[in-house]
Amino acid sequence: MSTSGITEPIDLMDPDLLHDPFHGFARIREEAPVARAVFPGKVDPILLVTRYDDVKTVLSDQRFVNNPANVPGGDVGNVREQLIKMRGIPPEYAKYVLESILDVDGADHIRLRRLVSRAFTARRVLELRPRVEEIAGALLDELPGKAGPDGTVDLIEGFAYPLPIAVICELVGIPEEDRPAWRDWGRSLVSLQPNAMNEPLIGMVHSIENLILRRRAEPTGDLLSSLIRVHDEDGDRLSDQEMVTMVLTLVLAGHETTAHLIGNGTAALLTHPDQLERLRAEPELMPVAVHELMRWCGPVHGTRIRYAAEDVELGGVKIAQGQPVMAILVGANYDPRRFADPDRLDITRESEGRRETHVGFGSGLHYCLGAALARQEGEVAFAGLLRRFPRLALACDPGELQRHYLPGSWRLAGLPLRLND
């Protein structure tokens, strides 16, 4: 494989890239259509794809698979397995993060997706909206009481996290008394320190196993009860491990990314007063504004690694069979080949009735199952904040905002606000 403009592998832990992935990946995108990258430690190098059309191909083309075991005719290294092993997770628990609906292809993926997709249809999500608004309203009522001595409130702690975790836990069937633990476990999983994932992962697995026993004895109308019924009626459709893994995946994916969409999006609006005022004046723009915020400051910058199931050419570069590839969403979402003036936040960008153009929720068979729910929660969260607190303002200089600097993501560690500045 040959590329132009970049001679050394990209260090995915490079502080400059972590602190400014927008310009960092833009430079990579313009210098090389495919770039070699490395993680620290004993992990196979990967290829980065950053241009819009190429990212769409990696995400949608069946020549790329999520499970390296599905690459024909060879022993392909599993990069995620190497990363998990490096983080010290015991094999008996690693399977719960290595064999989820996000890691399987073809018929297995379709089988698992069908078991839960009814809970995330556009109709079902619309039916949930009054309950989402009720939860958001209660949290906003409580927010002023969470102000510290200096009068500031951390939106991440007081609103951005509690809203989506309450919604997804109700949908899946996690009892209210268990939700604070799930929130702590989810935040612990982002640590890159060896063994830091062990305790939260073990805690989540045991919590789900215990909850399955309770729901089997006393079924309700939640998603977990439905999965238990499918398992008990036909174990070939859903194994014990798959049921635990499904719940784990849905709860984590259903609140972590949405929480940071709310945090990132609020910060973006407050630092772009022209867009904020436009949205206040025309609240009907909220759905397209959420799409633009997902493009401009979405929390996920790099996808799960795919593997070329055969030789594939992208951007004039040959990707050999078995090569691990990461699609860089932030590169695609800022690609001037697809988006005019991509650095500019424009809440009307998708207001002409066009289909979703950004790739913040992915594309293809693995398109985010909960995208409609995440968009709705974003709409409700931003609308509620702007309506309830008309003088909402940042309580610090934008450059002072603290982030969790992790490869492939964009997360605020906190968002200090003044509610009535």
Image (tube, rainbow, N blue to C red):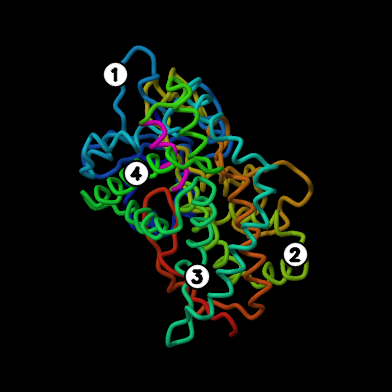
Q: Residue at x 37, y 30 (%)?
A: 240
SS at circle 2: helix
Tell me where residue 236 appears, x and y as whole percent: 44, 20
Residue count near mark 3 (Cα–Cα under 10 Å), binned few <14, some 14–19, many ≥20: many
Between marks 4 and 1, how big is the CA–CA gap? 37 Å
Residue count near mark 2 (Cα–Cα under 10 Å), binned few <14, some 14–19, many ≥20: some
Choose mark 1 or mark 2, whichever is in front: 2
Q: Earlier in the sequence, mark 1 or mark 2?
A: 1
Q: Is residue 196 above or below residue 265?
A: above
SS at circle 3: helix
Tell me where residue 194 appears, x and y as whole percent: 21, 49
The reply to whether the C-beta atoms of the residues labelled 2 and 4 are less than 8 Å apart is no
Numbered tag placed on residue 210 in the rendering: 4
The reply to whether the C-beta atoms of the residues labelled 2 and 3 are less than 8 Å apart is no
Q: Quick check: can you spot residue 406?
A: yes
SS at circle 1: loop
